[in-house]
Amino acid sequence: QVQLVESGGGLVQPGGSLRLSCVASGSIFSINTMGWYRQAPGKERELVSWITSGGSTKYADSVKGRFTISRDNDRNTVYLHMSSLKPEDTAVYYCNADLWSGGRWSDYWGQGTQVTVSS
């Protein structure tokens, strides 16, 4: 069984930084794209950033220049370094991975970690 477990969320003041981590574990043969999504209260879940196994990245316009995604393929881990945080970044952040397990490619999600930006 595959699990994605996020960590690193919390309360931070505007202008501050946080680093989120997500580890994928279980019976995993290969991981293609890993990424982060977020969902604020009353809003739909939206893409924040993703990174391929080869290191190609994509960012939402709202976080470009402030967030950096990276991954450690040997540890099946993806990171999201967030800086210059704004109150509008407040949301539950979810890790996502497109991976091969049980003989097929499937999409997996973590349970989410809360990020609150407030003074």
Image (cartoon, helix red, strand yellow):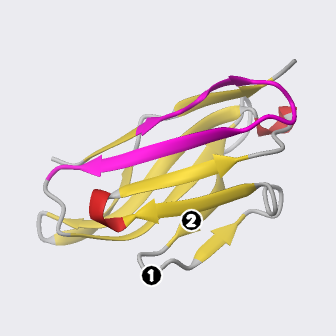
Q: Which residue is mark 1?
A: 54
**How many neighbours does mark 1 have within 10 angstroms: few (below 14), some (14-19), or many (20 or more)?**
few
Q: Is residue 75 left or right of residue 13?
A: left
The amino acid pointed to by label 2 is Trp
Q: Residue at x 17, y 50 (%)?
A: 26
Quarter of image, res 6: top left
Q: Residue furthest top?
A: 119
Residue 106 in the image: x percent, y percent? 30, 64
Q: Which residue is mark 2?
A: 50
- Give yes or no for residue 19 being in the magenta stretch: yes
Residue 103 in the image: x percent, y percent? 12, 71
Q: Nearer the viewer, residue 116 or 109?
A: 116
Q: Which residues are magenta?
A: 6-26
Residue 37's disc is none
- Give yes or no for residue 18 being in the magenta stretch: yes
**How many neighbours does mark 2 have within 10 angstroms: few (below 14), some (14-19), or many (20 or more)?**
many
Measured Cα–Cα span from mark 2 to mark 1: 12 Å
Residue 19 in the image: x percent, y percent? 59, 42
Task: Indicate the secondary structure of the residue bearing disc 1.
Answer: loop
Task: Indicate the secondary structure of the residue bearing disc 2.
Answer: strand
| Residue 92 visible in the displayed image | yes
Mark 2 or mark 1: which is in front? 1
| Residue 45 visible in the displayed image | no
